[in-house]
Amino acid sequence: MALYTIFGGRGFIGSEIVRQLESQSHSTFVPARDDCTVFERDLGIVIYCAGNGDCKNTPFSVLEANVSLLAELLQKAQFDRLIYVSSTRVYMNQSGSSELDNLTVCVDDSRRLFNLTKLVAEELCLKSERDVCIVRPSNVYGVALNSPLFLPAITRNAINHGKVDMYIAKEYAKDYVSVIDVASSCISLSLIKSSRNKIVNIAAGYNVTAQDVADVLQKHTGCEVVWHDIDFPNEIFPVTDITQIEKFLVDYNPRNVLDDLRYMIDKFKVEMKAE
């Protein structure tokens, strides 16, 4: 069994990675914030899923979490491999979504700092001459019913209040990938030597619209969905190319978000009856 160090191991993606690693009897180390011992010990295989996306309120923290600590680790730390968790948000408003496609930064994107820091971090990984692999997950979701994330939150509202407010356009579409699939893919790629210096999308490979989500909620809960007419952001996501990950992981079969949404609804109803 291997030693894994997970930066961001207490977060949404990181905690699932830790859970899966420990279930496989791997040793895990989750450093505390500002733990200087990370530069003094063997870190084994590093999975870097620390990050910050609050570009409006904490821009310097976005830089620190997405780039600064990573840069120090690449220069000073002792590790065998490093998996850097980036994002498919870098494909927003692009014509394609292959890992080899050219990318541009949109001037009207209020969170362009996030994209910029992710791309800087990726380039530092590739230029470091260390053993690294970069993964770009799409929009990661979970099915924990008490979670504040989008899908669990609207599921609770649909069942508890019979109403869901949608502040996005009906045709707004993006790729959703389960946190379980992201974690298992990161672990699998960490053990595949041919993934060195590669960028790999982790996604479902198809987009789901807000209307698709609303239809499932209405069908299985009878709730009312209220669409609010607001100034929607200019965000269009091309279908994510998953050719690369299918080459590395021959059994790659990501979960379907609409199936998981139906599972959440059924589970929530059962728990409510038990109370």
Image (cartoon, grey):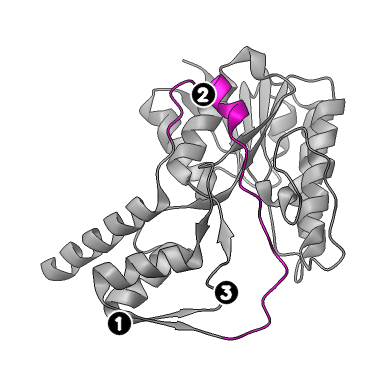
* Mark 3 crowd level (few <14, some 14–19, many ≥20, 10 Å Cα): some
- Alpha carbon distance from label 2 to label 3: 36 Å
Dot 2: element:
helix
Above or below: residue 226 compared with residue 200: below
Q: Nearer the viewer, residue 14 or 182?
A: 182
Helix, strand or loop under label 3: loop
Q: Which residues are magenta?
A: 229-253
159 horizontally vs 154: left or right:
left
Asked if residue 17 can be seen in this view, the reply is no
- Pinpoint residue 102: horizontal percent, then vertical percent: 83, 40
Q: Is residue 67 magenta?
A: no
State which mark lies toward you, 2 or 3.
Answer: 3
- Residue 87 in the image: above or below residue 37: below
Depth check, front residue: 263 or 16: 263
Which mark is in front, 1 or 2? 1
Q: Nearer the viewer, mark 1 or mark 3?
A: 3
Q: Which residue is painted at 61% across and 47% down in the image? A: 239
**Going from the N terminus, do you reach mark 1 or mark 3 first?**
1
**Which three-letter amino acid code belongs to the residue tagged 3?**
Ala
Q: Earlier in the sequence, mark 1 or mark 2?
A: 1
x, y (%) of residue 190? Answer: 58, 23
Q: Nearer the viewer, residue 49 or 227?
A: 227
Label 1 and label 3: CA atoms lie apart by 20 Å
Tell me the residue at 84%/60% (across/down).
106
Q: Is residue 138 left or right of residue 256?
A: right
Q: Amino acid at mark 1?
A: Gly
Q: CA distance from mark 1 to mark 2?
A: 41 Å
Location of mark 3 (residue)? 169
